[in-house]
Amino acid sequence: MKRSAVIFLILALAASAFASGGGQSNSGSAAAPAAAGFTDYSKGFPQKVTIQIPVYDRAFQGWNVADNYWTRWMQKEFGDKYNVNVQYVAIGRATEVQDYQQLLASHRAPNIIFHYDMPIAVQYYGEGVMQKLNWDEMANYMPTFWNRTKPMVERYGTINNDRVFFFAERPEADPYTTLVRNDWVQKAGYKVEDLTSLETFNQMLLKWRDMGLGVYGTQLLANNFTYSYPFRDWPINDAERTLYSELSVADLTWAPSKAFLKDMNWKYNNNVLDKEFYLRNDEAKTKAEFVAGRTGNFSFYMASNTDVMSSLKANNPTADVAVLPPGWNVPQGKVNQGRGYWPFGMIMGINYESTDQQRIATWMFLEWLNQDANLFALQNGVAGQNYTLDTNGLPVRVANYNGESNLSANSNKDYWCLIVEAARYPNQDMFWAANKALWTPAGYGNLVDDLIKYYRAASPYRTPDALFTVPLTAMAEYRADLNVLFQELYVKCVTCPEAQFESVYADACKTYLSAGYQSVLDEKQKVIAAGNYIK
């Protein structure tokens, strides 16, 4: 541990010097000596090359994703050195597919086309908007990044015998969690650690209602469908899982979906659910309900600079929060299942309209970003401003720092997610200690301790979906319409009288199947029978 800390301290000091403009120790790594047949651009491009890099726009207040201290820092430290103009293109997190479709149609899409979900990435491939990749070229211009990700690219990056995808790394970590008003829990006569089943949680919601405390809050389901996991059987039925489990299209007709909707219908009819849940179509709106004290729970990605707790305290000075334990939304007899990630993070391809020099400049940019000092700086900021180092060489975020070098509300992740999905450290102890620092708002270390404990405890029950290795044409054709239709149908199922639920749900399934979902299932069956998938 001490040796690792020393190594990491060296890296951290290098990063702080680099972030302050005082060192160039890794800048020469952006282009390796050219191999035979590849032009050497390690001294920069002879003519200016412009690359456009996508970045999620999560509508953080006061944050311009395309122009801020860190985009200018990357331009200065990488772009100016290699005669590359690095531009960022904002992609809405909740509207990314639509945004990409519009940008591609108008020939304004960035050089990297990315997504977190393989079926959507395969859909892009099926539309012919990605270049075929030369692995030797990638190894030449981004050698360290290639070496770290080569096994993933070789296993998952080929579709229909075309080499099209490359990937970010994905360490096993995730700060997504659900907070609960602990003061409400206690007033209702419960302890948070006792909320380990859906039935217990629902009984507590009735107490909240009767005491006039507040209701259960949730966000309108759209584009990311993991809601049915707590209602699925364990052990997993592989055949059903492969057919139905899908991040980008809701499994409305599967029995676990019915169980989820029936529970939501019960909540709605028993007045323990936010009556206008269907209007909360983004995180900002569900957050507003929580911090205003109208709802008693809130799900989000924990980050050290979140303002959720401070905003809640400003409105409700006596408010107290806790992390909900595993099982709080799981019916008795089920297990705390969740969607496991594939072993890669961001899935990426190169825009078919990119020039050779734009593609090479993109490889060089990723190689530069992959260097430890540069990645550390982007993840943590400037030493003495955004963070200090503790005795183990780990960064400790400076509370309430609001200067020019301030990081985005999710610690700049939307820039460094091209490289890795979580902060990179030499060993697991440092990894978890550093992520705790990255995720912990000042004074709330206990929340992140619980978050990490619960995440690790649930590890055996997180499993990845099957990965289809051919384009699903029906999915591409019907996905957008099914997503819109699903919202309408599931809201009907949730808000109908309890006595009408069975008939409303049956009608919803018929409508959904006839609108294209049956075609999706039929095509999947054929692909499964042909063996064109990876479990």
Image (cartoon, helix red, strand yellow):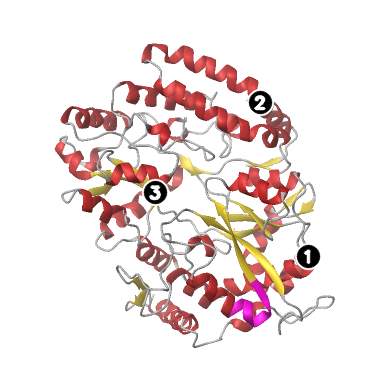
Taking the magenta stretch, the answer to whether it contains residue 490 is: no
> Which quarter of the image is occupied by the C terminus?
top right
User: Can you see residue 57?
Assistant: yes
The residue where tag 3 is placed is: 300
Looking at the image, tell me whether mark 3 or mark 2 is earlier in sequence order.
3
Question: Which residue extends farthest right?
Answer: 37
Amino acid beneath label 3: Phe
Which dot, 1 or 2, sits closer to the camera? 1
- Looking at the rendered structure, the secondary structure element under dot 2 is helix
Q: Is residue 289 left or right of residue 430?
A: left
Q: Residue at x 28, y 47 (%)?
A: 291
State whether residue 464 is above or below residue 207. Answer: below
Amino acid beneath label 2: Gly
- Looking at the rendered structure, the secondary structure element under dot 1 is loop
The residue where tag 1 is placed is: 355
State whether residue 250 is above or below residue 502. Answer: below
Q: Is residue 98 left or right of residue 129?
A: left
Q: Is residue 65 left or right of residue 43?
A: left
Q: Residue at x 39, y 47 (%)?
A: 284
Magenta stretch: give its range.
77-85
Q: Residue at x 35, y 46 (%)?
A: 287
Question: Which residue extends farthest bottom?
Answer: 22
Label 3 to label 2: alpha-carbon separation: 32 Å
**Pointer 3 local density, CA inside 10 Å: few below 14, some 14–19, many at least 20:** some
User: Can you see residue 324?
Assistant: no
Amino acid beneath label 1: Thr
